[in-house]
Image (cartoon, helix red, strand yellow):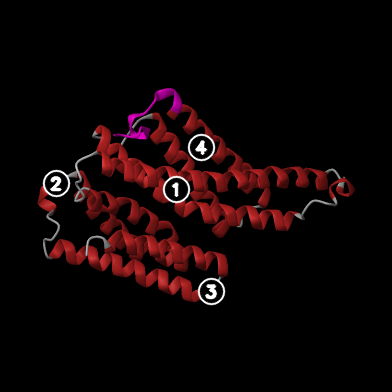
Amino acid sequence: MLILVPVLYFSSFISSIYYIYSGKLSFSQVSNWLFLFAVLCQIVLLGSQTIDFKLRNIETSLFVASMLLSIFAYIFIRQNIKNLYCFFISPVGFILTVPLLMIGIEDGGSAYNNRILIIHVLLNILSHTTLLISSIFSILFIFQHNRFKNKKVRKTSRLPGLSLIEKINFNLIICSFPLMTIGLTLGFLLSKNQIGSYWFGTVSVISIFSWLIYFCIIQMRIIYKLSGFKISILSLLGFTSIIAGYVFMYLLDLPSHTFIG
């Protein structure tokens, strides 16, 4: 049953994204039920002592923290943002529950490390490539926006309209975000397995900063109807931080990004 918890949280997250994208209430309802089933599984696992909280290790503490956070969000936060609360809480639940699942997998070594590393790298490449395309559309939006502002529309008549560029840009961010979330989570797990700590310094800070930028873009777009121009600016900031992460990763030669055996 343990594996169901992160799977349910992530499925809830994906379903909430479909709700945001399509506007269909059924996706929000599915997301809500998946979220509740994840919390119920956590309660059952702890109540039956399948997971022993007395161990007091960080993985178990994160698992319990995710359950308490989810219950708090359902009771208090849901009242304010209604159908969107799963979008904000479910990815956090996923990230906090995966470590406990992963410590039970002990292949002892290089095979395990390489499998996690390969998935981590592939997901990051896929999400970052999508965000690169998003950045290109952001530049195109800013260019087109400035042309309209300066009343030079004729020179950009062959370019797509602002509304179309904005829609494509936001959809690219939406598509890349789940992949980025999983890739980030696996990066912390890989670090724990190889260097004994979930935290690996500067790159951790930059990775979380990048993730938060795109998380905030989606949140502000949904709740505050953030303009396409501001989305483009923040998107470029987010991608710049991703590039900075790669630069620091290269300069620091992190062991968590080195294939073993």
**Distance of mark 1 from mark 4, alpha carbons?**
14 Å
Q: Earlier in the sequence, mark 2 or mark 3?
A: 3
**Vertical order, 143 against 79 (above or below):** above
Q: Earlier in the sequence, mark 3 or mark 4?
A: 3
Q: Earlier in the sequence, mark 4 or mark 2?
A: 2
The residue under label 2 is which amino acid type? Arg
Q: Does 97 lie within the magenta span?
A: no
Q: Position of residue 213 (x, y in %)?
A: 51, 44
Q: Earlier in the sequence, mark 1 or mark 4?
A: 1
Rendering quarter of residue 52: bottom left
Position of residue 144 in the picture relative to residue 86 (left or right): right
**Distance of mark 4 from mark 2, alpha carbons?**
34 Å
- Inspect this view and state whether residue 81 appears: no
At label 4, counting other C-alpha atoms closer than 10 Å, the crowd grade (few under 14, some 14-19, many 20 or more) is: many
Identified at 62% across, 43% down, the residue is 135
Q: Position of residue 60 (x, y in %)?
A: 19, 50
